[in-house]
Image (cartoon, rainbow, N blue to C red):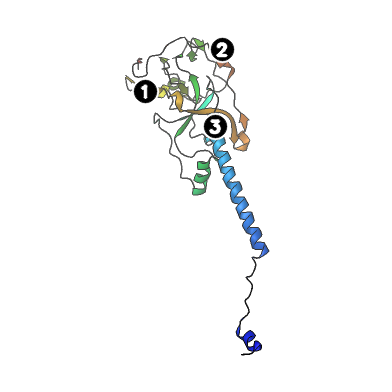
Amino acid sequence: MSDDADRAAVKPEHPATPPRPWLRTALRWVAGLAIYAVVLIVVVALVRTFLVQPFMVPSGSMQNTLQVDDTILVWKPAQPQRGEIVVFRNDLNWSLPASPPASSWRQFLSWVGILAPIHDEYLVKRLIGLPGDHVTCCDASGRITVNGQPLDESLYLTFVNPTLALTPFNVIVPQGRILVLGDHRDTSADSRAHMCSGTTPTPDLAFPPISSIQGTAFAIVSPRSRMELLNIPSTFANVPASTAMAPPPDTRQWTC
């Protein structure tokens, strides 16, 4: 067979078509975006776990300081102080209004911590008494006292029915627990509202564990028209330190 016939019998091999430049660019862009997204989620998760976390106000119990669906920022490392607004887990199963269903995208953003939690595991109240504090309601002027010091709450309290809001009590906050009240005091399912079941004292339900506190609220960030910093009312600066030793919550009794 001739050389010409051999060359004709062998089919030439076509070189592989190189990837198109725009496809390589798109793949690099997608990969870079995925890396940035993962880094963002990790950073947000770390910040939410250890520093700052957003929460949405679930009810009107803190009106008019906070409104329903306000988004607040909570500082997590701080030690809670009297007068601060605290967010705490609903370990005692206090009743909450039902939350409307959220979209899958909203649930995802809430899960990674970019948006506030949408479930009913957290409550927002004002911290009135720390462990060992002696808290009473009320003195002759209708004021709550803490360790003998009357509180001037006129700047932030909301009353609709003062008779309900000023239901008398005289308690010592058990060790490891806190006493919290809402600023809209006659509609707030708070410590005072859970002190009694009929005529039976219920100390286990009245004082949330201090370990349930998620952090202290320092700012309203949404809606934009309500953005502001949250401070401790000056009246709490006059409260003396506790000197009482409170018994365990299952043995503390009072009159209902």
Instruction: Pick the quarter of the image with the C terminus.
Output: top left
Specify the label residue 34 is tagged with: none
For the residues labelled 3 and 1, the Cα–Cα distance comes to 29 Å
Identify residue type, mark 2: Asn
Above or below residue 251? Residue 106 is: below
- Residue underneath mark 3: 50
Q: Which dot, 3 or 1, sits closer to the camera? A: 3
Above or below residue 207? Residue 58 is: below
Identify residue type, mark 1: Asp
- Residue underneath mark 1: 204
Q: Which dot, 3 or 2, sits closer to the camera? A: 3
Residue 126 location (% of width, % of height):
51, 24
Circle 3 sits in a helix, a strand or a loop, which is it?
Answer: helix
Front position in the image: 64 or 215: 215
- Residue underneath mark 2: 238
Identify residue type, mark 3: Phe
Q: Which dot, 1 or 2, sits closer to the camera? A: 1
For the residues labelled 3 and 2, the Cα–Cα distance comes to 31 Å
Q: Quadrant of residue 226?
A: top right
Residue 7 location (% of width, % of height):
64, 84
